[in-house]
């Protein structure tokens, strides 16, 4: 039995920053995550993707953000149970017992669910031969851009991921050719990214095909051709080494959905007073929660974790007065 003050389910950026905020209040944390390493989506899905809305960092790669958060949490010596999904939660007196899929048990008076979007799978386009080319030229996530060095890449999608990766692979001179295929003439992504793709297409640096869909794949032991059906021009064959459909992920709360928490639209309902759930002692922070005017941004999750920790302290120590101290005065070791 692993005992601690706060069990954090989810070792993504919000969970990691919560360790820091808890440490300032001398509260120990232990994190549980189904992934084999800390960082959540930032480490597993897009470690090399730049993030632009972290305060103080005009741009930072997702993997670098996780490295920094790990360093920030290090003085408070958090524990980790990695590669094991949290499956069950039970109440024992004033404590919760969280059991993982491998049977590892954790005990604490407070549980913070920072599971991001939960368990997710890629949305796959309806192409007959798609699965036969998985790991043979078809990828649904770009983990390491250098994997595509000198390769011909066809990206499908109209959201930020499709736009941003198309731009990145071209501007960093990684792929030898990038073709972006989208079924509409308008995009769902940020206007700046849309304009940049259009500009690169006009310069001949990106092949942009709109009002079209990828409908077929050809090849032997590896992908060789991508078949595109255009609304006006008919069928187009594009020579390609990789096809990357970026249509987003299908999120699911997984076992957490069966814990008796109030769920709305595949997210956990919380109060914005302290981001507590309908079960006293359990909080939900980051993308996993929902409330009026919710924004699924990392920086909002940082704020939510900070307030949740303050509430947790009052719950653990109802007779203690928590006087807010500032790290600019006390440093970190002063806590």
Image (tube, rainbow, N blue to C red):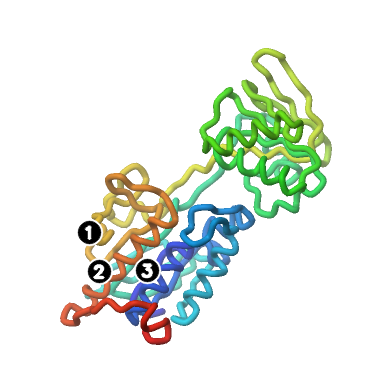
Q: Secondary structure at mark 3?
A: strand
Q: Would you name the residue on which mark 1 appears?
A: 273
For marks 1 and 3, the one nearer the N-term is 3
Q: Residue at x 49, y 72 (%)?
A: 81
Q: Are marks 1 and 2 in contact (CB under 8 Å)?
A: yes
Q: Residue at x 41, y 49 (%)?
A: 296
> In this image, 229 relative to 110: left or right?
right
Q: Quadrant of residue 25?
A: bottom left
Please state the horizontal and vertical placement of residue 51, each as a whole percent of the image.
55, 53
Q: Secondary structure at mark 2?
A: helix
Q: Is residue 162 above or below residue 82?
A: above
Q: Would you name the residue on which mark 2 appears?
A: 311
- Quick one: label 1, few (<14), some, or many (20+) residues within 10 Å? few
Q: CA distance from mark 3 to mark 2?
A: 20 Å
Q: Would you name the residue on which mark 3 appears?
A: 98
Q: CA distance from mark 1 to mark 2?
A: 9 Å
* The one of 139 and 172 positioned closer to us in this rendering: 172
> In this image, 150 relative to 184: left or right?
right
Q: Residue at x 53, y 52 (%)?
A: 52
For marks 1 and 2, the one nearer the N-term is 1
Q: Residue at x 76, y 48 (%)?
A: 174
């Amino acid at each position: 039995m692993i005992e601690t003050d706060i069990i954090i389910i989810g070792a993504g950026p919000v969970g990691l920053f919560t360790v820091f905020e808890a440490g300032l209040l001398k509260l120990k944390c232990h994190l549980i995550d189904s992934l084999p390493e800390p960082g959540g989506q930032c480490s597993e899905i897009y470690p090399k993707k730049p993030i632009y809305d972290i305060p103080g960092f005009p741009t930072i790669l997702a993997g670098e953000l996780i490295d920094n958060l790990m360093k920030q949490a290090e003085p408070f010596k958090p524990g980790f149970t990695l590669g094991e999904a949290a499956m069950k939660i039970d109440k024992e007196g004033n404590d919760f017992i969280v059991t993982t899929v491998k049977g590892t048990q954790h005990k604490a008076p407070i549980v913070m669910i920072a599971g991001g979007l939960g368990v997710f799978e890629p949305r796959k386009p309806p192409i007959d031969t798609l699965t036969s080319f998985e790991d043979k030229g078809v990828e649904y996530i770009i983990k390491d851009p250098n994997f595509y060095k000198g390769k011909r890449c066809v990206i499908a999608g109209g959201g930020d991921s499709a736009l941003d990766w198309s731009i990145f692979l071209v501007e960093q001179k990684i792929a030898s050719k990038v073709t972006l295929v989208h079924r509409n003439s308008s995009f769902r992504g940020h206007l700046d990214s849309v304009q940049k793709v259009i500009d690169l297409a006009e310069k001949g640096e990106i092949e942009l095909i709109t009002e079209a869909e990828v409908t077929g794949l050809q090849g032997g032991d590896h992908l060789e051709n991508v078949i595109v059906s255009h609304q006006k021009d008919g069928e187009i064959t594009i020579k390609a080494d990789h096809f990357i459909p970026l249509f987003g992920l299908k999120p699911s709360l997984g076992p957490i959905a069966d814990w008796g928490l109030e769920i709305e639209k595949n997210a956990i309902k919380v109060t914005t007073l302290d981001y507590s759930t309908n079960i006293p002692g359990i909080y939900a922070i980051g993308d996993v929660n929902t409330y009026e005017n919710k924004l699924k941004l990392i920086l909002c999750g940082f704020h939510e974790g900070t307030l949740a920790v303050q509430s947790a302290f009052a719950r653990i120590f109802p007779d203690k007065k928590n006087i807010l101290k500032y790290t600019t005065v006390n440093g970190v070791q002063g806590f």
